[in-house]
Image (spheres, rainbow, N blue to C red):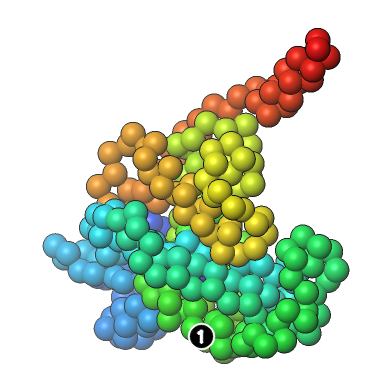
Amino acid sequence: MLNKNFPLDAKSVSRLATRGLPLEVLKSQIDESLDMFIELSRAQGVNIIRKRGYYYFDTKYMPLEDAEFCIVDIETNGSKIEKHQIIEIAAVKVKNGKIIDKFESLVFTKVINPIISEITGIFAEDTIDAPDLKTVMQEFKLFLGDAIFIAHDVKFDYTFISQSLEKIGLESLYNRSLCSLALAQRTIVSYRYALSYLNDTFHLNPNPMHHRAMSDVMTTYALFLLSIENCNESLNNVEDLIKFSKSAPRLKRPKFDPFLENQEEKKKEEEKK
């Protein structure tokens, strides 16, 4: 997924990730010079390289073990960017399966809907001493750099963060992205793919605090490792992984919820006693 503000059309983006884009096609879609476009794209999180006369995302030639993945989660005080904002953000940077850096912050806000507070455990008074949105977004963008952006159901987190950057006067994100939910659907058999359900099933995070950003990030990190471990596809680079997460067949789900079946079996055993 790339931000809608990226100047190239969808077909050209696809070619940057696969068989390469010719110079004439690239230049026909940009307003600035080629060098300026490449520099601006790098500043917004994606590197474009030239190889054998064609242009590619550098992730097309980047082995998985060399890539930096940034696993992200946000909590917000509502779903509409026009009225609401991020109230907590957390992220870990992962390279070759290991966490190499962490980012975490509450974000100052005057109002949090009581329903949101009930879900997250975050109240407006908890954010009194937290930095404001502009400060946190500036720091997060520096932390993210050109890493591949990963989140569970990535579209919401990616879009909300990108629009939050625009809201404070910064450029939106161009980073390549990967959905951990979509990847799990193609590598792990589960009745449901909500993060909390997957955690209950596979014991990904021993101390979960659902709907708190860093806890959900750590659960997603463990899920990402499990998905990579279970993937039998030959993946030569990051773009192979992104393509696999989007287009490989989803695994067949069980017809019945195993948790409910276990509960029914326990109930029958108790009735026999």
Q: Position of residue 70 (x, y in %)?
A: 43, 64
Q: Amino acid at mark 1?
A: Gln
User: In the image, what residue occupies the spot 37% across and 40% down?
Assistant: 229
User: Is 50 positioned to the left or the right of 273 in the image?
Assistant: left
Q: Which residue is mark 1?
A: 138
Q: Which residue is drawn at the image coordinates 52% and 45% (left, top)?
A: 204
Q: Residues within 10 Å of mark 1 (few under 14, many from 20)?
A: few
* Residue drawn at 54 percent across, 73 percent down: 104
Q: Position of residue 8 (x, y in %)?
A: 42, 69
Q: Position of residue 103 (x, y in %)?
A: 49, 73
Residue 31 in the image, given as x and y percentages of width and height: 39, 83
Mark 1 residue element: helix
Q: Decide if residue 80 is in sight here.
A: no
Q: Is residue 50 above or below residue 65?
A: below
Q: Quadrant of the C terminus?
A: top right
71 lies above or below 183: below
Q: Residue furthest front?
A: 273
Residue 64 makes an appearance in the image = yes
In this view, the residue in front, 77 or 92, is 92
Q: Residue furthest left?
A: 52
User: In this orientation, which residue lies closer to the viewer: 161 or 27?
Assistant: 161
